[in-house]
Amino acid sequence: MTVDRALWHPFADMGAVRRSRLVLARADGPWVWDTDGRRYLDATASLWYSNLGHGRAEIADAVHRQMRALDAYSIFGDFANEPALALADRLAGLAPLPGSRVFLGSGGGDMIDAAAKIARAYHAQRGNAERVHLISRANAYHGTHGIGTSVGGISANEAGFGPLVQATSSVAHDDAGALEEEIVRVGPERVAAFFCEPVIGAGGVLLPRDGYLEAVAAICRRHGVLFVADCVISAFGRLGTWLGIDRWDVRPDLVTLAKGISNGALPLGALIVAPHVAEPFFPDGPGAPVLRHGQTYAGHPACCAAAGAALDIYERSGLIERGRTLEAPLAAALAPLAGHPLVGEVRAGLGFLAGIDLGADALAADPGLVGEWQIRCREAGVLVRPLRRGIAISPPLTCTEEEIGLIVTGIASGLDAVAARRGL
Ligand SMILES: Cc1ncc(COP(=O)(O)O)c(C=O)c1O
């Protein structure tokens, strides 16, 4: 049945949505139900964020209590609220460097824009105003705000919008030498920052080569370029550690966080800023340079209360480490899919996430295969995320090995259904 409704869905073929819209009504743990009462296993933790599973009463209660006390108030200027102060202190305690500061916003894209502006402002404060160039990686995804779109590495996301932010460029995602060459080409004295997801998520679940992250961190340090670790997906247990990037022995200058920080229950982003970067903006007395940047809902007390409750659960549940414990079982469970005639590659084994690509020939013959595979998985009761060449999964960290088995069975039967319908 086709029903026309007013809602314009992000990243959606609205002509197709009219026929396939999935209207969800409730959720509990790794399960969600649609309005017809049909149950699905949420193999993507919604959009990579429900790391603790859905329906956490403790988060709902914390938000409820906060909204009855102070429902909303901005933190612009000298205003503050306890949930925002407490959250920033807790995140600073997780920071790679002691004495870090924390800037808050409403999601990952907010934090990417903040990171880019803070990087440029930091260099300007140090007398290097010409250091504005931003380098990122092919296949990267840094959200869809102005700067995030400009430093993204998925060309389809930039097409058709006209000129974007200037002074950006992109390098191969897996070649540290290419970063150094690009810094030298642009001129180190003109480069502000390098943006890097520890594991590239939406761009295909691309795992870093051994030594890559340490190498790019060292190159950045050598050239005075700030290293921005975009941990929006990688943090909060997805890679088995708090921040994601802390799985490696590197010290990023800026770390972007969002999604799992509040378990997605309310919108929130956070940016950890290393002490040396924040320092020009935090002098002892008045007269500091003002960072003229921030979103209305930065430090929203209800959102920060949700994050505070989520952090409590991460702390006491052991789920952060579980992201690492489950990586081998997930990879082992998915491995047989590599033998399916439609599958090109299975990428797993680092953190509780995976990418499964269709074969290049099958995709070239029929670019609609990914969309159809997603729908067939859904018919098999498993929600997966479609990417350019295949699907991604990033289930809640609460998933049992039995539920991992159900996910893999659903994906396999989705593949079989695609193959059968296409006569492959
Ligand atoms: C690595 C990364 N950075 C930034 C973002 C943007 O976050 P948001 O959609 O909350 O703006 C995303 C979103 O998926 C992401 O995966």
Image (cartoon, rainbow, N blue to C red):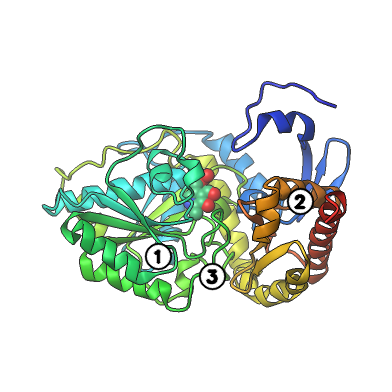
Q: Earlier in the sequence, mark 3 or mark 1?
A: 1
The answer to which quarter of the image holds residue 412 is bottom right
Packing grade of label 2 (10 A; few <14, some 14-19, many >=20) is: many
Residue 266, image x, y percentages: 58, 43
Give residue 373's mark: 2
Q: Label 2: state its secondary structure.
A: helix
x 79%, y 59%: residue: 411
Q: Does the beta carbon of the residue at mark 2 sit less than 8 Å from ligand 1?
A: no
* Quadrant holding the N terminus: top right
Residue type, numbered disc 3: Thr
- Of 392 and 13, nearer the camera is 13
Cα distance between the residues tagged 3 and 1 = 12 Å
Residue 354, image x, y percentages: 65, 64
x 60%, y 43%: residue: 63
Disc 2 vs disc 1: Cβ atoms closer than 8 Å? Answer: no
Which mark is nearer the camera, 2 or 1?
A: 2
- Of 204 and 108, nearer the camera is 204
Would you place residue 133 above or below residue 146 in this image?
Answer: below
**Mark 1 — residue?**
95
Q: Earlier in the sequence, mark 2 or mark 3?
A: 3
The answer to which quarter of the image holds residue 213 is bottom left
**Mark 3 — residue?**
241
Residue type, numbered disc 2: Trp
